[in-house]
Amino acid sequence: MATNDHEQAGFSEAERAAMKQRAGELREQEKSGKGSAKKHREAQACVDAIEGLDGSDRAVAELLHAIVAEEAPHLDAKTWYGFPSYARDGKVVVFFQPKSKFDTRYGSVGFSEDALLDDGVFWPTSFAVLEVTDAVGAQLRALVKKAAG
């Protein structure tokens, strides 16, 4: 149910750009082969995506990257719609969506259905992050450790 002209027009420019970025990632995966060389290229794409961020987006992405390396080294770094992300067996488990990507008020750390965060019949899968603090780091560390299994 669209309520304004922008919504009726379909996808925003940022959404279209993200879809094009994802299509490029998939094309790159197809031609990049398999094994350690592919994982290395995907990990470098993740690092490049983080380095392309500024301010709090970069600080949060760097924190998440460090936490995953320490708590879940079995997850593979890659990009997903241009976002820094981390996958288990090719399926994204955790990702960072920077606020700059869609010009939102905050970046968010999200967890896919493959994250092991199930808690009864209701649990959060995305967390807004305004800044890096010790408390944020501790919460992210616990979430990543649980989600990664």
Image (cartoon, rainbow, N blue to C red):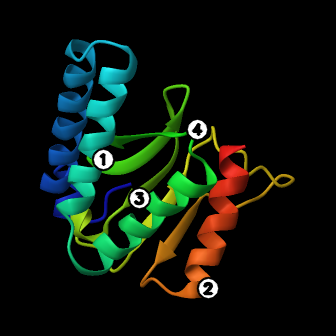
Give the residue at mark 3. Answer: 96
Instruction: Report the amino acid beneath label 4.
Output: His
**Between disc 2 and disc 3, whose residue precedes?**
3
Q: Nearer the viewer, residue 120 or 65?
A: 65
Mark nearer the viewer, 2 or 3: 2
Instruction: Report the amino acid beneath label 1.
Output: Cys
Asked if one can make out residue 81 in the rendered structure from this viewpoint, the answer is no
Q: Nearer the viewer, residue 14 or 44?
A: 44
The answer to the question of whether label 4 and label 1 lie on touching residues, with beta carbons closer than 8 A, is no
Mark nearer the viewer, 2 or 4: 4
Q: Residue at x 49, y 26 (%)?
A: 90
Q: Residue at x 40, y 72 (%)?
A: 60
Give the residue at mark 1. Answer: 46
Extreme residue toward the right, this view: 120
**Between disc 3 and disc 1, whose residue precedes?**
1
The answer to the question of whether label 2 and label 3 lie on touching residues, with beta carbons closer than 8 A, is no
SS class of the residue under badge 2? helix
Q: CA distance from mark 3 to mark 1?
A: 11 Å
Instruction: Report the amino acid beneath label 2.
Output: Ala
Give the residue at mark 4. Answer: 74
Residue 135: numbered disc: 2
Q: Please tell me how crowded label 3 is: few (under 14), some (14-19), or many (20+) other residues with Cα within 10 Å.
A: many
Mark nearer the viewer, 3 or 1: 1
SS class of the residue under badge 3? strand
**Between disc 2 and disc 1, whose residue precedes?**
1
Instruction: Report the amino acid beneath label 3.
Output: Phe
Q: Residue at x 21, y 66 (%)?
A: 53
Q: Position of residue 18 (x, y in %)?
A: 22, 46
Is the N terminus in the top left, top right, bottom left or bottom right quadrant?
Answer: bottom left
Q: CA distance from mark 2 to mark 4?
A: 24 Å
